[in-house]
Image (spheres, coloured by chain):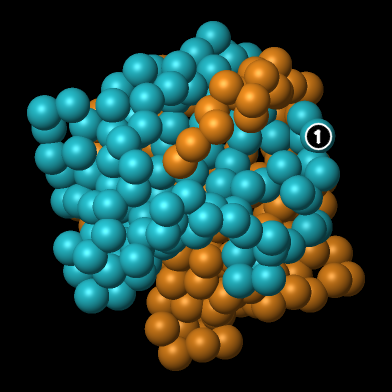
Chain colours: A orange, B cyan
Amino acid sequence: MRTFDNTRAESYLVADIEVVRWEQFGLGDAMPFSAMWYTVPPGSTSPTDCHPELELSVVLSGSATVTVDSSVAVVNAGGAILIESDERHSVHNHSDEPVLVFSAYWMPGDEHVGAEATEAMAHV
Amino acid sequence: MRTFDNTRAESYLVADIEVVRWEQFGLGDAMPFSAMWYTVPPGSTSPTDCHPELELSVVLSGSATVTVDSSVAVVNAGGAILIESDERHSVHNHSDEPVLVFSAYWMPGDEHVGAEATEAMAHV
């Protein structure tokens, strides 16, 4: 087992968005995706982003207002968003607590060759 | 974009652990991993589990006490745990709020062929 603490990891700022990339943990290709945490302060918005990777974002705290092209969705803590390739997206924080997000991202075509995982793992 | 709401999804109980599997969302092989949410009530412990899949668990609320073989780690909301293949693990909730976890899991050998994702995605 390895544990990862978002509050102690190395981070950097993109505007006022704090970003913690998982590359610093040296996991190599142990995971079939790249990962990061990021925090959007109250009242702030992440820079609009657009990339070929699919991105699954899980909201860990706060309430995220996600804009993708002309669609808007509010996702509360616990919920998740899957952003497809080349969708222009940004995350707004209209709440009064920080929005903390965990994102996994991968290139399309990184197929799920382990579909048998579903059957093998019957329990929690 | 698609959004996923853990509070509205179909769930089932394993002992008193509420499990929400992502297979219900019909994503097929869009993601290079399988996924679930699970909730450990205050004072409870998940059944000990052991499987070939690697499992990355992100704690969304509460404080999880994770036992893997003879090791114990406390992971607070925001933090994460990577469980290797065939490690016997369980999650205890010694706190007074539910421990909500998002887990991604995949078979070893589902390699990260998209390592270029790291370079391509310069921004949030």
From the image, which quarter does the N terminus of chain B lie in? bottom right
Chain label for disc 1: B
**Left or right, residue A11 beside residue B58:** left
Residue A66, image quadrant: bottom right
Tell me the SS state at disc 1: loop
Q: Residues within 10 Å of mark 1 (few under 14, many from 20)?
A: some
Q: In front here: A119 or A52?
A: A119
Q: Which residue is mark 1?
A: B28
Residue at point 23%, 44% (across, down): B66
Residue A81, image quadrant: bottom right
Q: In front here: A19 or B69?
A: B69
Residue at point 11%, 28% (across, down): B70
Q: Is residue A38 visible?
A: no
**Left or right, residue B22 beside residue A88:** left
**Left or right, residue B35 beside residue B56:** right
Q: Residue A61 at x, y = what percent?
A: 44, 71
Q: Amino acid at mark 1?
A: Gly
Task: Decide: is A27 above or below A11.
Answer: above
Residue at point 45%, 17% (across, down): B52
Q: What residue occupies the far top of the structure in this picture?
A: B109
Q: What residue occupies the far front of the structure in this picture?
A: B15
Q: Residue A41 at x, y = what percent?
A: 44, 77
